Image: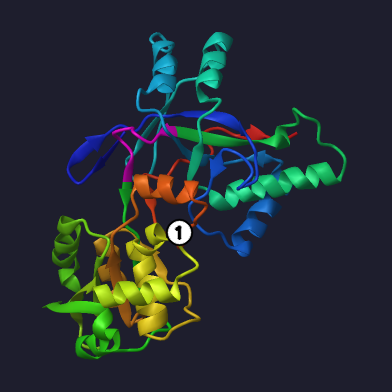
Amino acid sequence: MFDYAGQTFTRRGFMARMRLSPFGSGQVFPHEQTMPGPKMDRLMLMTTCRANLSQIFGLYPDPENAAQAVLEESLDDVPPLQATDELGVVHRMWPVTDEAVVAKVRELMADRPVFVADGHHRYETACNYQEHIRHVGGLTPEHPANFVLTMLIAMEDPGLIVLPTHRLFTGVPDLTADELQAKLGECFTCNTGPEGAENAAEVWRTVEAENDQSLMALFTAKDRRWTLCRITPEGRRRLDEIAEDQNPEWRALGVSILHRLLVEDCLGVEELPKPKYVHLVEEVVEGLATGEFPLAALVMPATVDDVRTLSLMGQRMPAKSTYFYPKLLSGLVINPLE
């Protein structure tokens, strides 16, 4: 249970061991790119601890809420375990020990795809750990390394919220709003917004109200000016040309337009340093106050439907395309791997 934007939400799901299948070979689908560094860190942790210390965040289709309903019907007289994290999010857990209930849920979940919402690096690391155990000759069909601890939440759950991930850039040209617009040329229509980083909330309300992946807001630190940018038909044609390796659904995402067309092509920055990723406009303002970032971008997140569509097509979104709030709390359940 958590509060966001003046409302209280309850997100419901269940934790279980999920049998591993490498991406592309089963019913578990990724939606974001991964990087080798984080996977190496997680493999070292997993090898040392021989346990899953935090769970994968998985989404599955269940319009009738059948699996969750079976679980909740069995818990009328079971008191929950409860923890409140530093953000005030209340986490409640009910242990399910009735084997008949577990079997029914397993049956309901058997043919459903699972889309990784968060934890791509941990999932791929679990697959690498499984291969390590196989290589040393200890992998039996029911060995714990064949599974990974997963929190499973229905894609239709009303408490499932996707928040944006805004960008603070280094390694890009230090431009004024006019110079930025000249760089963007015919690929974007640009409208100059208010001056001052402190107006980020006002600018974001404009972008969010339109709920359009083609619209984003950029802040140029050189003149402290906001600019609202929308891709044009010419920009679409250019993106189709430079991103022909991706499908139209990928090219329609705001984060794809931002990184592939605006930053890489229009600004000519092909080796972009990793941006600072933040989720709240207040964090954008704080970051800009440091003077470290010549450019900031407020961009709409991908949706749950985008995750489903692109995952089934085998396409991976740019990094940090989604932020499922709140994050799952680590350490509540530990899954031993031996």
Please name the predominant secondary structure of the magenta segment in the image.
loop
On screen, residue 219 versus residue 96, left or right, reads left
Q: Residues within 10 Å of mark 1 (few under 14, many from 20)?
A: many
Q: Position of residue 152 (x, y in %)?
A: 47, 33
Q: Quadrant of residue 276?
A: bottom left
Q: In percent of the image, x 65 and y 40: which residue is there?
A: 21
Provide the residue designation for mark 1.
317
Q: Quadrant of residue 64?
A: top left
The one nearer the camera, 265 or 54, is: 265
How far across and how far down the image is residue 22, in percent?
65, 45
Question: Is residue 330 rendered to the left or right of residue 24?
Answer: left
Q: Is residue 195 visible?
A: no
Residue at 65% x, 50% y: name it. Answer: 125
**Which colour scheme appears in the figure?**
rainbow
Q: Secondary structure at mark 1?
A: loop
- Horizontal side, residue 25 vs residue 181: left or right: right
The quadrant in which residue 234 appears is bottom left
Relative horizontal placement of residue 5, taking residue 110 as reference (left or right): left
Tell me the quarter of the image containing the N terminus.
top left
* Above or below, comparing residue 3 to residue 13 in the picture: below
Q: Is residue 246 magenta?
A: no
Q: How many marks?
A: 1
* Region of the chain picked out in magenta, as a range: 153-161
Q: Is residue 191 visible?
A: yes
- Give the image location of residue 85, x and y in percent: 39, 41
